[in-house]
């Protein structure tokens, strides 16, 4: 029955993508972040679900362009050039990789992620479509949150929660970061929602997201959650409402979470006594030392296989920043950081412009939440190897589209009231 349900979901998404190509972009987000096909147990368990829908979207886009006699043009933005340069850097480091067989496979995977962003650039050309894509991502993660958050509450936070099998965020630590990143997207949907029942559902999902992160028992997830909350409080329009809710949630967590949870979180301040934390510090030292010796080529994808000092006890980088600089050198780290933090600065500029009536108010609201989500990723990446996740690159493309749509509306001569 599971496989039949997955097949019917794919068939429905493919049919919608053929009729309306931009809806296929939403379907790709569903498959990427909800991962319904990962629950298959029979003929759909190894079926190329995502690739099939991507092919349908590509064919539909081509057919639509043929009928219209023109191809849609992506908006130009400096980040598109950085994407291209980063891909060239990845190709260069793969060519000089210490572990070529694995590196070329990984380059193929990251190339597919970059290529999958192209339909989003070409087809999401209005505020309405951008909003629907954002809430599609939010609900895709939100349904996973619903399962994990419900389990956390029902078990009294005694057990760790995990993501969908086979996904980038299956592990409890990765799951915590993904859920923290999704909170601002849910908050954006909540801000735009007008129906009372929907607002209550979204508020419940935000609460369950906090519960799911806490029940992951992830120290990095707790730090990521704190960063997300600070960004929301910093830029949110309803700080006077959010702060009491966060305080109430904190009190509830203190009275509900088990003592062992607090013992584990307490090791954040005593990391030098924790074996897991010290092993991460050792990995970081090894990675930075290798990057200093090979600043241009790095070790290539999966370079830890070649860099590790003891093949009998393999290590992982446990940091996206260390992962990037070790595997792709200083140039790779520079380009990758430009994408992440440059996008956050670009979103901050949109917020500033919206506050001075130089950009649509809605664009400022969207920028606040996208920036908070990217900040959550930047924080989570300090302690986890998330450099090749697809969601941060997707958020960067969304920020590119947001800037383009905001400029287009402002250029049309629209007048905006001053933001209080």
Image (tube, rainbow, N blue to C red):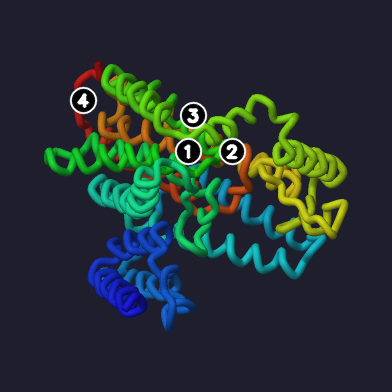
The tag earlier along the polypeptide, 2 or 4, is: 2
Q: CA distance from mark 2 to mark 1?
A: 13 Å
Residue 348: image quadrant is top left
Q: Residue at x 69, y 67 (%)?
A: 104
Q: Nearer the viewer, residue 244 or 417?
A: 244
Q: Nearer the viewer, mark 2 or mark 4?
A: 2
Mark drawn on residue 227: 3
Specify the label residue 416 is tagged with.
4
Which image quadrant is residue 37 in? Answer: bottom left
- Say whether disc 2 or disc 3 marks the residue closer to the N-terminus: 3
Structural distance between the alpha carbons of marks 2 and 3: 20 Å
Q: Quadrant of the N terminus?
A: bottom left
Q: Which residue is mark 2?
A: 338
Residue at the spot x=68%, y=56% of the render?
A: 90
Relative to 58, residue 318 above or below: above
Residue sitting nearer the eye, 165 or 384: 165
Q: Nearer the viewer, mark 2 or mark 3?
A: 3
Which of 87/251 is in front? 251
Quickly name the residue at label 1.
374
Instruction: Judge depth for marks 1 and 3 and give the one in front.
Output: 3
Dot 1 lies on which element? helix
Q: CA distance from mark 1 to mark 4?
A: 27 Å
Tag on residue 138? none
Density class for disc 2 (Cα within 10 Å; few <14, some 14-19, many ≥20) is: some
Q: Residues within 10 Å of mark 4 (few under 14, many from 20)?
A: some
Residue 381: horizontal and vertical position, in percent?
A: 59, 41
Helix, strand or loop at label 2? It is helix
């Amino acid at each position: 029955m599971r496989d039949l349900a997955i097949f019917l979901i794919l068939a429905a998404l493919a049919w919608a993508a053929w009729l309306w190509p931009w809806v296929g972009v939403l379907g790709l987000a569903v498959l990427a972040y909800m991962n319904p096909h990962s629950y298959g147990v029979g003929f759909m368990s190894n079926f190329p679900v995502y690739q099939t829908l991507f092919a349908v979207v590509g064919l539909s886009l081509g057919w639509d362009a043929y009928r219209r006699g023109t191809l849609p043009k992506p908006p130009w933005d400096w980040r598109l050039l950085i994407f291209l340069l980063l891909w060239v850097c990845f190709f260069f480091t793969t060519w000089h990789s210490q572990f070529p067989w694995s590196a070329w496979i990984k380059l193929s995977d990251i190339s597919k992620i970059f290529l999958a962003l192209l339909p989003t650039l070409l087809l999401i050309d209005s505020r309405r479509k951008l909003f629907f894509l954002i809430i599609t991502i939010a609900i895709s993660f939100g349904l996973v949150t619903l399962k994990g958050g419900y389990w956390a509450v029902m078990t009294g936070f005694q057990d760790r929660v995990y993501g969908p099998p086979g996904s980038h965020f299956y592990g409890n630590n990765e799951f915590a970061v993904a859920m923290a990143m999704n909170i601002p997207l849910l908050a954006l949907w909540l801000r735009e929602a007008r129906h009372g029942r929907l607002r209550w559902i979204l508020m419940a999902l935000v609460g369950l997201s906090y519960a799911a992160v806490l029940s992951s028992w992830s120290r990095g997830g707790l730090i990521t959650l704190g960063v997300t909350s600070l960004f929301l409080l910093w830029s949110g329009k309803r700080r006077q409402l959010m702060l009491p809710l966060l305080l109430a949630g904190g009190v509830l967590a203190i009275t509900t979470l088990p003592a062992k949870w607090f013992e584990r979180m307490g090791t954040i301040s005593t990391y030098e006594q924790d074996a897991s934390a010290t092993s991460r510090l050792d990995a970081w030292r090894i990675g930075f030392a290798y990057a200093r010796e090979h600043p241009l080529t790095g070790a290539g994808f999966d370079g830890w296989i070649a860099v590790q000092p003891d093949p009998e006890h393999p290590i992982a980088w446990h940091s996206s920043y260390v992962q990037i600089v070790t595997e792709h050198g200083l140039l790779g780290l520079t380009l990758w950081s430009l994408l992440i933090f440059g996008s956050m600065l670009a979103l901050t500029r949109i917020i500033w412009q919206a506050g001075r009536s130089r950009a649509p108010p809605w664009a400022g609201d969207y920028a606040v939440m996208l920036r908070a989500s990217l900040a959550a990723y930047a924080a989570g990446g300090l302690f986890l190897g998330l450099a090749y996740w697809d969601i941060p690159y997707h958020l960067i493309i969304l920020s590119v589209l947001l800037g383009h749509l905001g400029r287009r509306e402002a250029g049309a001569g629209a007048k905006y009231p001053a933001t209080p």
